[in-house]
Amino acid sequence: MTFDLGPALLFCPADRPERFSKALTRADAVILDLEDAVAPADKASARASLIDAAVEPERVIVRVNAPDTSDFTSDLAALADTEFRTVMVAKAEDPTALDAFDERFSLIALCETARGVAAADRLAAHDRVVALMWGAEDLVASLGGTSSRQRDGRYRDVARYARSRVLVEAGARGKAAIDAVHIDLDDAEGLAAEAADAVASGFHATACIHPGQVPIIREAYLPDAETLSWAETVLAAADGERGVFRFRGQMVDEPVLRHARSVIARAGR
């Protein structure tokens, strides 16, 4: 099992069925949220909307409530009445809790608490996990903090550590990593910079909470013409070379060629 849904993943409250189809037209995949986006009183209606949803299941991720909540069991029962098979597990902390899902499901473990980040290696090792995602605000709340970012908009060190750990642990086990949402909807510049850093660092996708953020994320993940030209040229130059070689003043070895292949893959070529 692999994760290949595209770079821009848009959250949509599961109790707003009138938004489902439109969300799918705007993003690469939609995360129908049964957890934080839905008030406790509306959880049952959200599950009913999930069961009745007339959308293509291949491009839908369902975020379920944390395994240690009573809502989790109800979420599983609702999923059994749908064709949705990609599930994001909120506040994942214990890999054994993921055994509640059988082999039909592909899981995204959301590491958004201190325990979840600490267990990222074991969560990534689970057979049904195809990706890890991290979350900033819940993480800081679990530590008793008040904000994941400094006044200038940059992540605090603890959030940067969690982001890096989730990325590395996912990559170490051949799983995808998904970057956290940018909650400042008016900060297009900050989102663009964050998404560009995500793709340069090795994230496979970035989650978002508003359709207006989708094109910014897509643009960041799509290599620009100069980068694409460099990748094509350096790979062509590698033909016939043995091991390391010099190209335009740069030493080129296998890691550099892997970077170039990654650029080509993101361009869809």
Image (cartoon, rainbow, N blue to C red):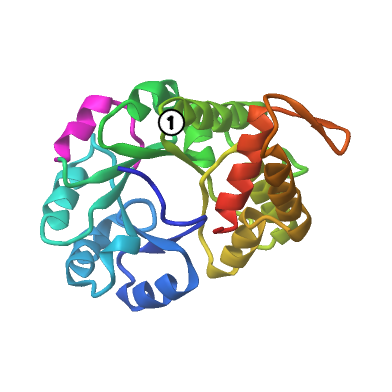
Q: Residue at x 49, y 40 (%)?
A: 135
Q: In this picture, is 222 found above or below 89?
A: below
Query: What is the three-letter code of the residue carrying label 1?
Result: Thr
Magenta segment: 90-102
User: Magenta stretch: residue 101 in it?
Assistant: yes
Which residue ends up furthest to the right in the rendered image?
A: 249
141 or 191, nearer to the observer: 191
**What x and y, as percent, mark residue 235?**
67, 43
Looking at the rendered structure, the secondary structure element under dot 1 is: loop
Q: Residue at x 21, y 46 (%)?
A: 105
Q: Give the image quarter of residue 103.
A: top left
Q: In this picture, is 253 found above or below 148?
A: above
Quadrant occupied by the N terminus: top left
Residue indicated by mark 1: 113
**What x and y, as percent, mark residue 197?**
68, 43
Say if residue 1 shows up in the picture: yes
User: Magenta stretch: residue 130 in it?
Assistant: no
Which residue ends up furthest to the front in the rendered image?
A: 240
**What x and y, as percent, mark residue 113?**
43, 31
- Left or right, 267 with respect to 173, comes to right
**What x and y, as percent, mark residue 216?**
64, 62
- Left or right, 189 with respect to 109, comes to right
Quadrant occupied by the C terminus: bottom right
250 or 159, nearer to the observer: 250
